[in-house]
Amino acid sequence: MAEPSFELPSIDASDVVRMRGVTLVDVRKHEAALASGEMADGAIYADPFGLHHEHVLMKTTGKLIFYCVKGHEVSQFAAALACFHKRDAAFVRGGFEALLNAGIATAAFRAGEST
């Protein structure tokens, strides 16, 4: 019998730059986001240490795209949690650095506007 398999959905940063109608979620650790001073324009910030099964993002509709600094553990955890809750979710391969290299518009980091 074949083993069930699961591959965590990911997306290329250049595709994210062209997407409309998705919720882009910044899940960088707060210190890293503050040090950067910027975030993707239109993104919302979710403290990665505050993500849990009852988090509001696990109950909303629409596609969620998560990014952290480099697209490793933090955004992958957030995307996996959302997928567990049957959300249409993915993480950005390469994280915020890749988004910047792909030309995403940025805005000042808004620390007080976390979900």
Image (cartoon, grey):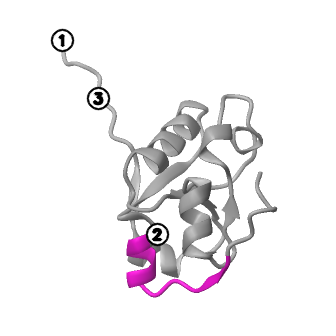
Instruction: Answer above or below: position of 17 versus 30.
Output: below
Secondary structure under the numbered disc 2 in the rendered image: helix
> How many C-alpha atoms fall within 10 Å of the one at disc 1: few (<14), some, or many (≥20)?
few
Rendered image quadrant of residue 94: bottom left
- Residue at left offset 71%, top offset 45%: 57
Q: Amino acid at mark 2?
A: Phe
Which segment did they paint magenta? 97-108
- The residue at the far right in this view is 112
Q: Quadrant of the N terminus?
A: top left
Instruction: Answer above or below: position of 24 versus 8.
Output: below
Where is residue 113? Give x, y as percent.
80, 62
Instruction: Check whether the beta carbons of the residues at disc 3 and disc 1 lie within 8 A of each other.
Output: no
- Residue at left offset 73%, top offset 37%: 55
Which residue position is annotated with label 2?
Answer: 96
Where is residue 58? Give x, y as percent.
69, 39
Which residue position is annotated with label 3?
Answer: 5
Q: CA distance from mark 3 to mark 2?
A: 28 Å
Where is residue 40? Give x, y as percent.
60, 75
Q: Amino acid at mark 3?
A: Ser
Where is residue 59? Give x, y as percent.
75, 39
Specify whether 55 is left or right of 27: right
In front here: 82 or 33? 33
Dot 2 or dot 1: first in sequence order is 1
Secondary structure under the numbered disc 1 in the rendered image: loop
> How many C-alpha atoms fall within 10 Å of the one at disc 3: few (<14), some, or many (≥20)?
few
In front here: 40 or 57? 40
Instruction: Check whether the beta carbons of the residues at disc 2 and disc 1 lie within 8 A of each other.
Output: no
Instruction: Answer above or below: position of 20 versus 58.
Output: below
Q: Amino acid at mark 1?
A: Met
Q: Is residue 58 magenta?
A: no
Dot 3 or dot 2: first in sequence order is 3
Which residue position is annotated with label 1?
Answer: 1
